Image (cartoon, helix red, strand yellow):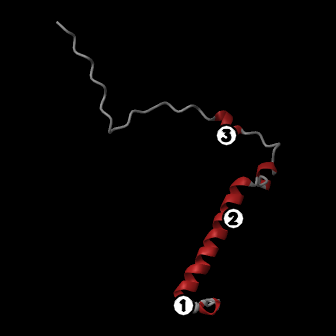
Amino acid sequence: MASDLDFSPPEVPEPTFLENLLRYGLFLGAIFQLICVLAIIVPVPKSYEVEAEPSEPRSAEVTRKPKTTVPSVNKRPKKEPKKKR
């Protein structure tokens, strides 16, 4: 009975070019996803432009006037409700 068992490793065919391409493409995609997740989790220091000239007054924001809402051309004015008799 022991002589009937075959313990030799199974024959595995050599992977084709497309299988290798798919395999390494999946690895690259997984690495890209990990980099994207780490970019979200790890805080990045602010750029030097924010701290470049803090002494400059923000005159553009101070002198800006609030915008008045202009009704758009596409919208029709609301109809007044009719009076009931």
At horizontal 68% and vertical 34% (from top left) the residue drawn is 62
Q: Quadrant of residue 4?
A: bottom right
Residue 11 in the image: x percent, y percent? 58, 92
Residue 35: which numbered mark, if any?
2
| Type of amino acid under label 2 | Ile
Whichever of labels 3 and 1 marks the residue nearer the N terminus, that label is: 1
The alpha-carbon separation of the residues under discs 3 and 2 comes to 38 Å
Q: Which residue is at the front of the view, 52 or 8?
A: 8
Q: Which residue is at the front of the view, 6 or 27?
A: 6
At horizontal 80% and vertical 55% (from top left) the residue drawn is 48
- Tell me the residue that label 1 is attached to: 16
Q: Is residue 79 left or right of residue 27?
A: left
Whichever of labels 2 and 1 marks the residue nearer the N terminus, that label is: 1
- Tell me the residue that label 3 is attached to: 60
Circles 3 and 1: CB distance less than 8 Å? no
Residue 33 in the image: x percent, y percent? 64, 64
Q: Residue furthest front?
A: 1
Label 1 Cα neighbours within 10 Å, binned few <14 / some 14-19 / many ≥20: few
At horizontal 83% and vertical 42% (from top left) the residue drawn is 55
Circles 2 and 1: CB distance less than 8 Å? no
Q: Residue furthest left?
A: 85
The alpha-carbon separation of the residues under discs 2 and 1 comes to 29 Å
24 in relation to 43, above or below: below
Q: Is residue 53 left or right of residue 8?
A: right
| Type of amino acid under label 1 | Thr
Q: Could you tell me which secondary element the residue under label 2 belongs to?
A: helix
Q: Could you tell me which secondary element the residue under label 3 belongs to?
A: helix
Residue 81 in the image: x percent, y percent? 26, 17
At horizontal 79% and vertical 53% (from top left) the residue drawn is 45
For the C terminus, the image quarter is top left
